[in-house]
Amino acid sequence: MNWWQAGIIYQIYPRSFQDTNEDGVGDIQGVIRRLPYLVELGVDAIWLSPIFTSPMADFGYDIADYTDVDPLFGSLADLDNLIDAAHRCQLKLILDLVPNHTSDQHPWFRESKSSRDHPKRDWYIWRDPRPDGGPPNNWLSEFGGSGWKLDSNTDQYYYHTFLSAQPDLNWRNPSVRSAMHDVMRFWLRRGIDGFRVDAVWYLLKDDRFRDNPPNPAYRPGGLPRDALVPVYTADLPEVQSAIAGMRRVVDEFPDRVLLGEIYLPIERLVAYYGRNLDGVHFPFNFALLTAHWDAITIAKLVEEYEAALPTGGWPNWVLGNHDRPRLASRIGPDQARVAAMLLMTLRGTPTLYYGDEIGMLQAAIAPEDVRDPFERNVPGIGVGRDGCRTPMQWDGSSFAGFSAVQPWLPIAADFREKNVEIFRQDKASLYWLYRRLIQLRRNHPALAQGTYSSVTACGEVLLFVRGLPEDRVLIALNMGDKPVPVTFAKEDLPGWVLLSSFGDRDNQELTGHVDLRGNEGLIVKLSSSGTPQRRRVGVEVDRRGSG
Ligand code: NOJ
């Protein structure tokens, strides 16, 4: 198995992880300082959101120099030190690659904008105004309003999928592709272990610039961008060859990985593995970020995903990131423990978002504290991402151990009771549950490599088996808050509880029947041998118990 298959990825949003130079913003030295924490937690790889030179209109996703580090985060030397230090602790380092757009301050864009005849004009997407002076077509920005901005100097519009300060590169231009490939080589040569590629399904746009059709399902008050179906601005077939080109660059170096940020339904998502597995190593699977949290929905989506994967395509699961509301707020703190168990026992690489291991909540952000440009552009309908980007809660000191000064975003109100220092001393904490789960995954090949077989999703109970011929592990999750009696078929028992989410049933022997408490999860080693494919686990769930 490759490291990116066997391992666990931990996403760090660097602005909010650890500040060391007392400016209220996290930095690379801060990540270095906290490496021992990550080692202790047991993760295998860090994915660092952008640390490159940027005016920070979108907090680093607007890059003005792809091959340098923004002074806010440190220096290139700091990043080299991080690569070394991470590798010394056996941690891999994945950087964010943002190829769809640059900052409007990037020299490429400044040159492109300088005149219609500049050789870099075609590096971006420029179009004439409509006869009435309006934008060339109806394409919308993801962050609200038209996707086109007029440059009055050259009297043409440029296209931006996100902010107008983030002009889209023209990926139909071979020079753009090779410039981005050189950026990739620059970092790969410095020793990073791979890239998470931002917004990669947007890379190509219709070359005839046709209007996107209206979305019949759109309801007023919804996200403005959802008014149209983005058939001509996203997920175009041509994107696959652009990705295959990036993959070839990554493959020039041994043991590196290319991961894609792609928000699409499962049947479209899986195309990004590439026709011959020559696309991304895996497209992030975000299905759990929005799924209704009940056993039947989750079982269905796991099965659909497993069935849709191409032969040889490696699965993965994500429960949180810097763009979506915090997990513990979405499903509640009790279910956050069950979710931890699900994430660490499903088949495929888990990605853990910083702070989710201590159950950080979506912080309430007062209007005057809003920093997210998306929220500023489209206020009041709940798109704000600041609440999931608040500083890491390390301890109970004034700025939560994150900084010695007022941080760039407020610290969540509960930090004095919920922080790493306190949770580390409490073996019953979520943090310890994560540590145990990670260890268990490491020690049980069935969890890292075994097949997935669904057993049942009944009432609120989700049961599945991860199996290798010599090792079968049953996962039983109660996704509701009522107790549910579960009876196992005799031939699968006795079984031994390897890990219980409440921590009080570990090593218990199961001989036939178990009362799964509300919000409880159990990981059970089954005693009988035989491949999971050959014989299903017999189980009966008393639905009355599930309320
Ligand atoms: C996706 C990133 O995750 C998000 O934070 C960013 O705003 C957009 N891409 C634009 O780069």
Image (tube, grey):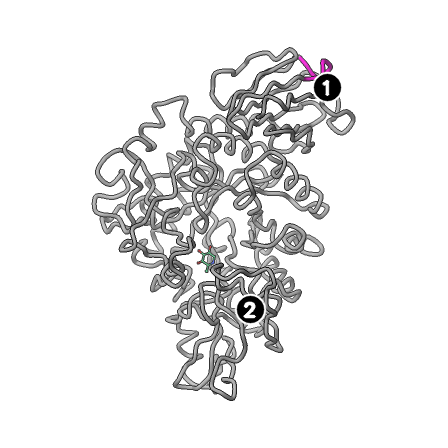
Whether residue 124 sits left or right of residue 70 in the image: it is: right
**Who is closer to the viewer here, 94 or 290?**
290
Give how far apart the Cα atoms at labels 1 and 2 are. 52 Å
Q: Residue at x 39, y 46 (%)?
A: 388
Whether residue 440 sits left or right of residue 89 in the image: it is: right
Q: Which region of the structure is painted magenta?
A: 488-493
State the image coordinates of residue 318 (x, y, percent, origin top left). 53, 43
Asked whether residue 310 appears in the rendered view, the answer is yes
* Quarter-of-image position of residue 451: top right
State the image coordinates of residue 81 (x, y, percent, origin top left). 36, 48
Q: Residue at x 52, y 81 (%)?
A: 127
- Quadrant including the C terminus: top right
Residue 448 tag number: none
Residue 473 in magenta stretch: no
Q: Residue at x 68, y 29 (%)?
A: 456
State the image coordinates of residue 503 (x, y, percent, origin top left). 47, 19
Residue 492 in magenta stretch: yes
Residue 529 tag number: 1
Residue 177 tag number: 2
